[in-house]
Amino acid sequence: MAGTVIAVLAALAAAGSFGVAAALQHRQARETAAGKALRFRLLTDLASRPAWRAGIALAAAAYGLQALALAFGPLALVAPIVATDLLFAMPLAAWWSRRPMSRRDWAGCALVASGIGIFLATSPPSSGRSDAPAWEWLLAFGAVALACAVAVTLGSTRSEAVRAGLLAAAAGVTFGLTAAVTLSASRLVRDAGPASILGHWQPWTLITLGLAGLLLSQSAYQAGQLPASLPVIDTVEPISGVVIGTAVFDERLATYPSMLAIQLSGAAIAVAGIALLAPHIQHSQSARETSNNPAEGTPR
């Protein structure tokens, strides 16, 4: 029970930190020159911006909190909670644009919170296993790599909003896999100590996944408005995390059909809330960009 409390509190703190970090990173990424292809120079360009570095530092702290949560709780518990970072980005976007949150915004927040609550309340208490056979990991990595390759390829020939959404989907599945590897690494540190992890594959894989997820997410932020990317990431990441958790770690959704229906309904309610919040963020972001570019008269 104590482990579950730690997991929930750490995941909530991670969600808040990720939300603020995403808002900071998006603001800086939109101010850099866009391109059709993924380019690593984007990260070096952004690294020269103090506000973006602050966002990365905050995201790193959030990742540490997520790792703590995964050390004590299953991926199917932690991933949906972390996906509520949009609830923290919302007030920040409203504050930046100096626009109060509307009833629609509050309704979206309520749907997300209640949907996540229903999903978690109907989740079984089992935490599953901490690692998996190599072939199961290879299948997970192969599926994520294929999904990312398809999204990036299709995005290079699409409009700005579609490109942002496809890159965000690729970032979401990458973050879902990153969370799964983080769970394995954090359990290893918890059970065997920090020194033992350097001889395993997890930390080196996390570095690679971290760079890939960072490039994909920043490219998505750069390509379009925040509602074209962050809601997609917040939808795809927990779904992929739950799928990987059940496939790799033997975590379980609700056992009885009636409870499973309620649990999936909670997930659908949360997704509907995220979709409801998107128009506000787009309006807030557009208003802020217009105020920053008064000579243009229209948002980018």
Image (cartoon, rainbow, N blue to C red):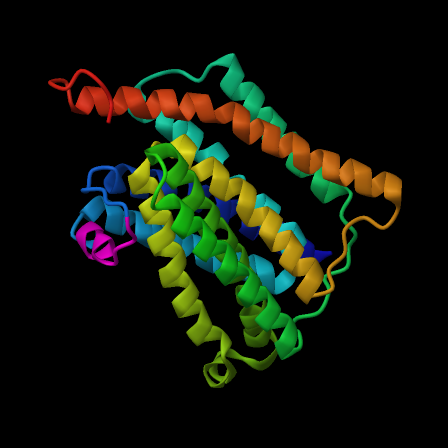
Q: Name the residue located 18 percent from the left edge and 24 percent from the top edge.
A: 292
Image quadrant holding the N terminus, namely bottom right
- Give how far across and how far down residue 296 sits, in percent: 14, 19
Residue at (76% x, 56% y) in the render: 252
Residue 288 vs 213, above or below: the answer is above
Quick check: can you spot residue 268? yes
Q: Quadrant of residue 249?
A: bottom right
- Residue 282 part of the magenta-drawn span: no
Expressed as whole percent of the image width and height from the top left, the position of residue 57 reads: 32, 54
Question: Is there any visible trace of residue 74 in the rendered image?
Answer: no
Q: Is residue 45 magenta?
A: yes
Q: Farthest residue to the front: give it.
A: 157
Residue situated furthest left in the rendering:
295
Is 199 on the left or on the right of 123, as rendered?
Answer: left
Q: Which residue sits at x=37%, y=42%?
A: 22
In the image, what residue occupies the spot 32% across and 26% down? 285
Which residues are drawn in magenta? 37-46
- The image shows residue 242 at horizontal and vertical percentages of 65, 53
The image quadrant that residue 271 belongs to is top right
Relative placement, left or right, of 141 versus 221 is: right
Q: Nearer the viewer, residue 122 or 248?
A: 248
Compared with 218, 133 (above or below) is below
Quadrant of the image containing the C terminus: top left
Dominant secondary structure of the residues highlighted in magenta in the image: helix
